[in-house]
């Protein structure tokens, strides 16, 4: 696998990423920024936005990837040598793209 990533490193990176998304959403709810419902099932995190649109962040362990499903499409990310999740086609960083998609779909500027 790229950069000799092993399952234990991948698992830790996925856990940290999903936790960061969840804690950011929790903070927004507390601060009344936006009403997003986050539901976690194993390696899948579903974010339900006020307009009933969704963002789905999903671990893909066999591939060592992180997937994002949004209105604008589906994206696949792999960890790079710096520990950032980067889009396998464009190189876009996961949190930047998640922020852009969440902002688009909620019509609120959101930064993960």
Image: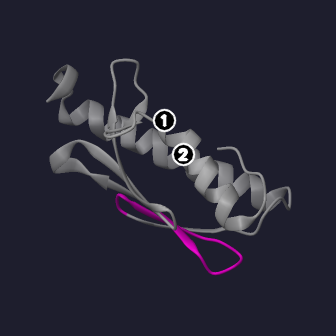
Whether residue 51 sits left or right of residue 92 in the image: it is right
Mark 1 → mark 2, Cα distance in angstroms: 6 Å
Q: Mark 2 falls on what kind of element?
A: helix
Q: Count neighbours of disc 2 (C-alpha within 10 A) and say few if under 14, some if 14 to 19, many if 20 or more.
A: some
Tell me which residue sits at (19%, 26%) in the image. Answer: 2
Question: As displayed, is residue 1 above or below residue 17?
Answer: above
Can you say which quadrant of the picture contains the N terminus?
top left
Tell me which residue sits at (78%, 59%) in the image. Answer: 108
Tell me which residue sits at (65%, 66%) in the image. Answer: 105
Task: State the image quarter where residue 26 is shown.
Answer: bottom right
Question: As displayed, is residue 55 above or below residue 27?
Answer: below
Q: Contact (CB < 8 A) between labels 1 and 2? A: yes
Q: Which mark is residue 22?
A: none
Q: Position of residue 45 (x, y in %)?
A: 46, 62
Can you say which quadrant of the picture contains the C terminus?
top right
Instruction: Quickly name the residue at label 2.
Output: 97
**Residue 43 sits inside the magenta stretch:** yes
Q: Position of residue 103 (x, y in %)?
A: 69, 56
Question: As displayed, is residue 89 above or below residue 3?
Answer: below
Q: Count neighbours of disc 1 (C-alpha within 10 A) and say few if under 14, some if 14 to 19, many if 20 or more.
A: some
Query: What is the magenta range?
Result: 42-56
Task: State the image quarter where residue 57 is shown.
Answer: bottom left
Instruction: Quickly name the residue at label 1.
Output: 93
Tell me which residue sits at (59%, 56%) in the image. Answer: 101
**Residue 109 sits inside the magenta stretch:** no
Q: Position of residue 56 (x, y in %)?
A: 46, 64
């Amino acid at each position: 696998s790229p950069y000799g990533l092993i399952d234990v490193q991948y698992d830790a990176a996925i856990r940290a990423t999903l936790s960061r998304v969840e804690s950011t959403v929790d903070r927004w709810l507390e601060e009344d920024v936006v009403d997003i419902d986050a539901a976690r099932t194993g390696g899948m995190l579903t974010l339900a936005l006020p307009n009933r649109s969704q963002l789905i962040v999903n671990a893909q362990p066999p591939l060592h990837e992180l997937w994002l499903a949004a209105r604008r499409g589906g994206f696949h990310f792999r960890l790079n040598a710096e520990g950032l999740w980067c889009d396998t086609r464009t190189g876009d960083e996961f949190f930047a793209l998640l922020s852009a998609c969440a902002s688009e779909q909620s019509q609120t500027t959101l930064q993960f």
